[in-house]
Amino acid sequence: MPESVQLPHLQINGYKTDEPYRYPRLVNIQSRLVERDRAAHGARILNQLNNIKARFEELQAVQLPQNVERDEAIYVEFVSEWSYPLKFESLYDSRENYQLLKISNEVIENQERYRVLVMLKKGGISHFIKAVEKYLDESRDRIKIDENGNETRRTPSNNALLANVELIQLASLEAFWSDAPEKPFPNVEQEVWWEVWFRKTSNDDEKMLKVLNNLNSIGAQITNSDIIFPEHTIRLIKASAIQLSRSLMLLDNLSELRSPQELPEFITDEEITTQDKETWLQDLINRTDNRISETPVVICLVDTGVNNRHPLLSPFLPDDRLFTLKDGWGKYDSWSGGGHGTGMASLAVYGDLTEALASPERIQIFHGLESFKLIQRDVINEPELYGSITKSACYTPASSNPQNPRVYCMAICDPDFAFKGRPSSWSAAIDKIIVGEPNNQLDPPQIFVVSGGNVHIEGHNEYPSKNEIESIHDPGQSYNAITVGSYTRKERLSAEEQNNGFSALAPYGAMSPSSSTSLFWDSQWPNKPDVVMEGGNRATNGTFTFLSNNLRLLSTHNNGAKIFQSFGDTSGAAALASKMAAEIMTKYPNLWPETIRGLMIHSADWTSAMLGNGRVEQFTEPRKRALLRTVGYGVPVLSKALYSASNSLTIIAEREIQPFLQNNNNDPKYNEYHLFKLPWPVEVLRDVLYTNDVKLTVTLSYYIEPNPGNRRYSNSFQYHSHALDFIAIKPNESLDIFKRRISSASEQEEMEESIDTSGEPWVLKRLRNKGSIKKDFIVMSGADLSTRNIIAVFPKNGWYKTRKKLGKANTKVRYSLIVSLETPRTEVDIYTPVQTQISIENIVEIPINV
């Protein structure tokens, strides 16, 4: 972008009112119920419950070892009839007589049924026995009478709860197993490491002490680290299934079992061999201006360590910013093949060294580096909770240098998890690190960049089909993180390679062969990756592919004598994304992390190759969804993230909202929405751009607080604390009608769309309603757009509202609203009229008539 049009983005302080928000209409989604012989069905499940009660009484009478304590609890599975759902919300009880722990489903020959794991105490068993007795009692039936006084329908009491229940049985330890289907339950006699999820209770410290005592009594090995979430505590335990069954099944707070995550090896990079390496190095050093302040923005690389003695890195990474998980590893990068953390480091500072070395221009660098060595090659350690050690990797540098704003960047990931996008303890821990505590200076919100994880392409025909079926790697499913995939503009090979019949595999501007996707994730999870950055390409002869240095990024080598190495894939893309985030943060030091993330994604766009030389506005909904779940919102553009222009303005509003309200002991309700009447270049849009297309882009960025578990993330068991969305006034729609449309948006918890968008030509519509960042755009005439300056930000459901006992309903949360207007007519000035209005508003608040 030319210097003459580099205008600062516009921030607004007013232009907002708070409106009460409620859902006056409730949508009653009817579930299909099995037609039963009530007497036979009720008698059968009553017998099953009585057998469970008898077994419970037997277990309570068993004499336990001296150091082992028990709770009055038993674990039971409710199994549905094939092709019929269960009423999950009825299996949760705030009094803790019974607790829903896990919901799983099984599919055989296109038929599906559910298994619901429930912890029952004595009172819980009695509760369900009474429920069945009421079901059998015809005097309790609900009878519907028609206008002539005739009985038209008789419904048994508790019919919705019990009709679809086929079986109630005692649970085994295997019922707690909630890993991906391809990970079988371990051999019951083999001692293995387990990721054990404990449900938090009112006397949690006492309960966990009891758990640890029980585990010690059976000789289990327990790691010291843990992860704590609103409803779960997670520990790593080594024992056999038989040992765990004898111990944990006696307690009432076991929730889930998973296998610990293991870290994969990185791809081995070939060495760059160039006669002029030393000359290039010195030339780049001479052209680099170190503009780092005393407290610069730093990029904290959570990786394999960095060799900061490299002359390109030493000015930006002093020794006191090197950290390590274990002192015996050292702080430097000993990874083979040129190093991994060292390779990411120069990309995070300079970008692709191929471009930096080739350019004669001076380079100014304003941000620095930090390094936390999280893994060491060829060292076998006891497993750790990667969420816990990632937390340590983030908090250790922050506590040592609290004055530095930072961007966290991590390209370590696990390809064996990320099961259909479901959160893991690792991704949830990253979400928790990112959201922090907005009003706590010791734990502020953060910017965190993670790589999507690599796909290894060998055969020519594997691209892009293998990319489409390989999932984004854990923890790339994190809601709050910026998950980065790879695309490529590298397609030039050497004359020798071309003469040997090789060409670039991926077309110019298309998804890189290394990028993974979220195409086959369950629909409720975020669209990932969020954005894509340059990750390099592969060469192909039509049969096989290989890594060509000419199609990869150039970076620093961890062996100082070799200086450079080829690099790339999603690790390189993540490093480039962290560089961009640091540059935005340096330009706008007072903006929230939510806004920095928002500006990156707001600036992104798809290449013509990603769109197949078409227009996304003309795509079908499935094709739009595929676009979002392969390359996200496209490639972020630094100049657009940093600057407005006379014909392209960006308005930023940072606000705090309280989505829900709970008074006394009442159920939480929706509380408020925000109404923005934005400063708008009405005359220019209406008069100058009357028939011209103008693009309106809106991005809403906020962080959620995670609440992980495996209890079917719907209804009252959302993973996210809250959700927000936006809506714009329609052309010729009055403000009163617009406000009624907002507050009459129905709460459809099983549906993706909850607002009336008819008449709103948003391009992505309900496809944007995933995760914690929402972006959409409209292209219309200036005349139509001239009246569309009123936008509402409103709340949607989350566990702050539905999990009443956690006491978070009155929590205030932050969000950033970013709005852009853009016209291709460069001679038209839409920036100055808006800047003038904002300047007046900053002196005197402009009232909004609502």
Image: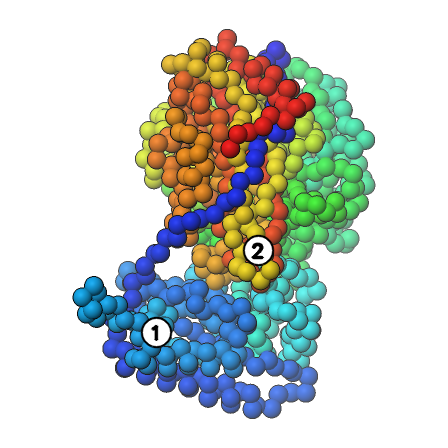
Amino acid beneath label 1: Ser
Residue placed most toward the observer, 393 or 277 = 393
Mark 1 highlights which residue? 157
Residue 423 seen by the camera? no
Q: Identify which residue is drawn at 78% across, 46% down.
A: 399
Is disc 1 placed on a helix, strand or loop? loop
Residue 550: % across, % down: 53, 27
**Distance Cα–Cα, label 1 vs label 2:** 31 Å
Q: Identify which residue is drawn at 59% across, 80% down.
A: 71
Sequence-first disc among 1 and 2: 1
Q: Identify which residue is drawn at 50% across, 22% down.
A: 821
Q: Residues within 10 Å of mark 2 (few under 14, many from 20)?
A: some
- Which residue is at the far top? 827
Amino acid beneath label 2: Gln
Query: Is 227 located above or below residue 76 in the figure?
Result: above
Residue placed most toward the observer, 846 or 181 = 846
Circle number at residue 662: 2
Residue 755: % across, % down: 40, 41
Residue 596 seen by the camera? yes
